[in-house]
Amino acid sequence: IRATLCFFPEMARLARAHNDSNVLVLPGRFIAPELAKLVVQKFSETKFEGGRHLRRLEKISKLEKGGGENTENNL
């Protein structure tokens, strides 16, 4: 599960495109309903880009499985 807190549509786009986020977290107290709808729409319509971003997710997955040290160079 990759959850991302998004205040703006661009944050939602980047969460999906670069981090393959699969859970959108909205700051209910800090976002207007109309803006929240735009954030949800952008999150829903954006696909993961893969490529150079996939390598980072593979490193995280390896760390989660205990297959590497948690060092700054690994991330």
Image: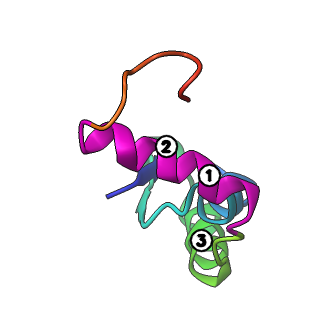
Query: What secondary structure is marked by label 1?
Result: helix
Tell me the residue at 59%/46% (across/down): 56
Does the stretch in magenta take in 42? no
Q: CA distance from mark 2 to mark 1?
A: 6 Å
The magenta segment: 50-66
Point out the tag, 2 or 3, that comes first from the N-terminus. 3
Q: Main secondary structure of the magenta part?
A: helix
Q: Position of residue 20 (x, y in %)?
A: 54, 63
Other-residue count near label 2 (Cα within 10 Å), few / some / many at <14 / 14–19 / ≥20: some
Task: Please say if the residues under marks 1 and 3 sit with CB atoms less than 8 Å apart.
Answer: no
Outermost left residue: 66
Point out the tag, 1 or 3, that comes first from the N-terminus. 3
Q: Using the image, tell me which numbered label, if any, was put on residue 55.
A: 1
Identify which amino acid the numbered label 2 is placed on: Lys
Query: What secondary structure is marked by label 2?
Result: helix
> Does residue 32 sit above or below 33 in this rendering?
above
Q: Position of residue 68 (x, y in %)?
A: 36, 30
Q: Which of the colour schemes (rainbow, by chain, secondary structure, one colour) is used?
A: rainbow
Identify which amino acid the numbered label 3 is placed on: Phe
Residue at mark 3 = 43
Query: What secondary structure is marked by label 3?
Result: helix
Q: Look at the image and tell me in which quarter the C terminus lies.
A: top right
Residue in the foreground of this view, choosing between 57 and 48? 57
Q: Position of residue 8 (x, y in %)?
A: 68, 53
Tell me the residue at 49%/60% (across/down): 21
Tell me the residue at 45%/54% (across/down): 26
Task: Please say if the residues under marks 2 and 1 sit with CB atoms less than 8 Å apart.
Answer: yes
Q: Is residue 5 visible?
A: no
